Image (spheres, grey):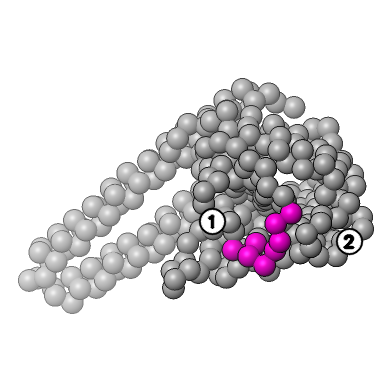
Amino acid sequence: MKTINELSAELETKRQAFLSLFKKTKIVNNVVLIVIVLAMGGTFIWLFQVDMNLSLIIVGILIGVLFFYSRFAKSWLGRKTYDYIYGYYRLTSDLFFHQEGFSQIEISEKEGITLEEFKLSGVLKDEVGIISRNKVHGLVEGVPFVLADAGVRVERDKKTEVAFFGKAFVFELALPIEGRYIIHRRINQNGTLPSGFADLKEIETDGDRIVLGTEAKAPSLFKKQLIKTIGMFDMDTELADVTLTIHGGKAYLLLSYCDDVMNVAYQKEVAGSSLSRYLNDLSIVREIAKSLK
């Protein structure tokens, strides 16, 4: 398995190659556009008075060529862009999930979780859309899980805005529980709580952490070790909040990350520190899975 430095170097090489391809493609497209426009102008000026019909036919053909070339170039660059994005996911997933504690891992870079699946977490209300990809499923410490990158939009005051952007984990519980219980930590303690918490009772508050539930007493699954494990995440500019929701036969872990952790590197250099950060957080996810058994 590659080290963080080796992977960062490989990803940066691929980023530079893709950036170079994008710039070259843009130059070629501009050259083709200029050549076709000049050809149409020349045809119209030189042939119009000699043979108007022939002139119009040639100009029409050139317009058709320009139209089909534009569609081809857009489609070709789109495929190259997705090849780069999915290649980035494949390489990083090799680092993140081929380590102790993870097994039977299957990855589908093009798939994600659905809006209906996200709604089951009960963290938000009024969700209207989701963009999700890089779906991972398998076992973590023997617990079945699904993970995907997700950006979720909600409607507020007749406007849509992003209410969650990060990593969404779903764990299968061995025994279902009644009610709904949440552990939530956030860097901005003065901000409003997620809209899905409104109907829950406060069980305890400690610093940046709040525990809520449908009843004033948490179930035995919410033991001190689980709450302590949630406290292991470093809350900073890279990780804005952490939410663990348990209800029914599933547990949902939502990690709200910054762009450097979430986005595929394009304009900025590959940040090895962000890769290290997420790799370290996955070790905490493993501890959470142990506590959910």
Q: Are marks 1 and 2 in contact (CB under 8 Å)?
A: no
Name which quarter of the figure residue 224 lies in.
Answer: top right
Q: Which mark is residue 192?
A: 1
As displayed, is residue 47 above or below residue 205? below
Type of amino acid at the residue the image marks with label 1: Thr
Q: Which mark is residue 254?
A: none
Q: Badge 1, how many Cα within 10 Å: few under 14, some, many 20+?
A: few
As displayed, is residue 111 above or below residue 84? below
Report the span colored magenta.
195-203
Q: Secondary structure at mark 2?
A: strand
Mark in the foreground, 1 or 2: 1
Q: Which mark is residue 176?
A: 2
Tell me: 36 left or right of 191.
left
Tell me: 253 left or right of 5.
right
Residue 269 part of the magenta segment = no
Residue 202 part of the magenta segment = yes
Asked whether residue 104 appears in the rendered view, the answer is no
What residue is shown at x 52% (from left), y 48% (from top)? 190
As displayed, is residue 211 above or below residue 187? below
Type of amino acid at the residue the image marks with label 2: Pro
Tell me: 240 left or right of 226.
left
Residue that sits furthest to the bottom in the current view: 53
What residue is shown at x 83% (from left), y 49% (from top)? 222
* Percent position of residue 157, x then y: 44, 71
